[in-house]
Each structure stands twice: as structure tokens, then as C-alpha cells.
Amino acid sequence: MITLRLLVVIHCGCFKFIVLNCLTLMKALRVELKKIRKAVFPVAGLGTRFLPATKAMPKELLPIVDKPLIQYAAEEAIAAGIDTLIFVTGRNKRAIEDHFDNNIELERALRAKGKHAKADMIKNILPDGVECIFVRQPEQLGLGHAVLCAERVVGDDPFAVILADDFLTYEGNGITSDLVRGYARSGKTQLSVTEIAGPDISKYGVIVPNKRPGSVAGLIEKPSALDAPSNLASVGRYVLTPDIFGILRNLTVGSGGEIQLADAINTQAENDGVESIILNGCRFDCGSIRGYLDAIRYIDDSKK
């Protein structure tokens, strides 16, 4: 019936009517993209650069003044409309679960001393409706493997990945919100990128730019500075489409003898499935002592 109508219109020469009719049909048949409701936090790392401080305490609980790194990351996810926080943990990481759980005894002690504001603060670390799920990564096999450990919880949904080590300042609701909006526009995997000058580019996954602005042709994990295809490095915020899991399952071991998330994203990029968004703030590498101290100074100065 639709085909007959279009043939008649073509015969009459009403091109404008054809276009409008086709657009209406496309809109009616379009499948609405799923909203980003889940975020994966890979937190199984050993934090060896901060020993002995991290011998018994997860590095993700290192405080930036008065709030741990992982809480900043969780708040960024929640600001982006995410309500399911999936933590991929390892041994000696139980304290992360405790941090996001209720502490009735502490709350009662604070209220007994009249410290109601602090009691309310620890009670409301997460708003109502936000759920935490904890998944164990039994062996340290790379970021790609950590993401793959969350597959059963994520299912067939698009999702964010947030690395708490990358402490980001931002305007508005944050870079994760920007990535979520980017996904809503195109349905493609979204990368947060920032410019890195000089030899430090070799520490990152580096994007291969496409001809279209924001489009990514590839992602190369830790190339040499001479071989880097650009000065745009992927940093610790992603929105991924669920086909990433099938790619990760079939990957061979990559850089460092690990399953690299960058290699899986590179496969998506080769099929025109990846876009990038420039970081709209400052980044501090809190996986390093210098970056961690710089982040503390930044937040301390902002509170003055």
C-alpha cells in the first residue's frame, strides 16, 4: 500500500510530498534507543603506587580533602541520570561496599551528640532509587576483562564505564552527562578525550581521527610518541554499546599481557561505531601520587 502511494506521487512529480511521507514512515518505524541507566566502576586494582597506604584500604577510598575518589565518581554517574552502580571489585575491596552502605551505629552516635548535619550526610551518600551491585573480578586481566565481568548485570543495555582514578572537574553535570547525550543522538559508543602533549601520549589509548568531526576511526593502546595517530587521548569515561561484550570475549591478549578495552573499542571504531567528546574540564591522574596531590590542592583551593 505504501509502495503504491509513492509510485503515484512520483508520477505526479510531487517530490516534497514524497520526502515528507518517507520521513513520517521512518519516524514511525524508528526504534527508540535505550537510556543509559547503568555504570560500571572497575575497582579491583591493587593500587601498588600508593603502598603501604593501600595495603588494607582500597585506593578508590583515598580522600580528596573530605570525600573519597569513588564517591566523586558515583556522584558524576548519578548526575548523568544513572541509577544502577556496578562495582567490579577484587580481594580487600569490601570497604567500598561498606562506604555506600548504611552505618546505623555511626549515625546514632552523631545524632546523640547533636551532629545532625553530619548524620544526614552519611545517611544520604546515595539518593533514594540508586542501587549498588558488586561483582568480583577473580583475576587481574586488564580493563577489558573487568568490564566483561559485568556482562551478566549489564545485559543488553548500553552503559557507562567510569574510572575513579581519573578525577575530573567539569562544568554542568559532568563529562558522563555529555557522553550520555552523545549516545542519545547517535546510538554509538562515546569516548571522553583530551589533548596530551609530548611523550606522555604513549601512556594512553590514542584515537585515530575520522574525517567527520567527533567521529573515531580507531583507538590505539599506548603507541609510541612517534607513532601516535593524534594528540587526543581517551581518558577514564566511556559510554559503550552492549556489543562490546561479544568483541571482548573474542579478543586475544593485548598490550601488557592483558585484555584491553581499547582493542575492543578499536574494533567498534573500524565499523563506524565510535564517537568522541572533548573533556569539558580538568583531569587529574589520581593513580599517581603527583596527580593525587594536585587534585587535593585544586579542591582545597576551590573551597576557600
Image (spheres, grey):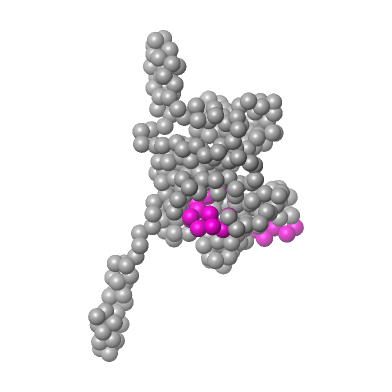
Task: Quadrant for the N terminus, please.
Answer: bottom left
Relative horizontal placement of residue 197, taking residue 157 as reference (left or right): right
User: Total label count?
Assistant: 0
Which residue lies most toward the top here? 113
From the top left corner, tell me how far across and down residue 294 is, in percent.
63, 33
Asked which quadrant contains residue 81, the reply is top left
Query: In the image, what residue occupies the spot 48% across and 55% down?
Result: 242
Q: Is residue 72 above or below residue 117?
A: below
On screen, residue 293 above or below 242: above
Residue 285: image quadrant is: top right
Residue 99 at x, y percent in the picture: 49, 27
Question: Does the magenta-highlighted stretch encompass residue 85?
Answer: no
Vertical side of 53 occupied by 158: above or below? below
Which percent across, then down, holds residue 131? Answer: 41, 37
Front residue (pair 109, 235): 109
> In screen coordinates, is 292 left or right of 299?
right
- Where residue 21 appears, as percent x and y from the top left, is 28, 75
Instruction: Residue at 75% x, 58% y: name it.
Output: 226
Q: Name the one closer to the observer, 10 or 268.
A: 268
Q: Residue at x 41, y 9 (%)?
A: 113
Residue depicted at 68% across the width and 54% down the height: 254
User: Does residue 52 appear to the left or right of 154 in the view shown?
Assistant: right
Based on the picture, tell me whether residue 233 belongs to the magenta stretch.
yes
Asked if one can make out residue 115 in the rendered structure from this viewpoint, the answer is no
Q: Which residues are magenta?
A: 226-248
> Is residue 253 left or right of 95 when viewed as pictured?
right
Residue 134 visible, this orientation: yes
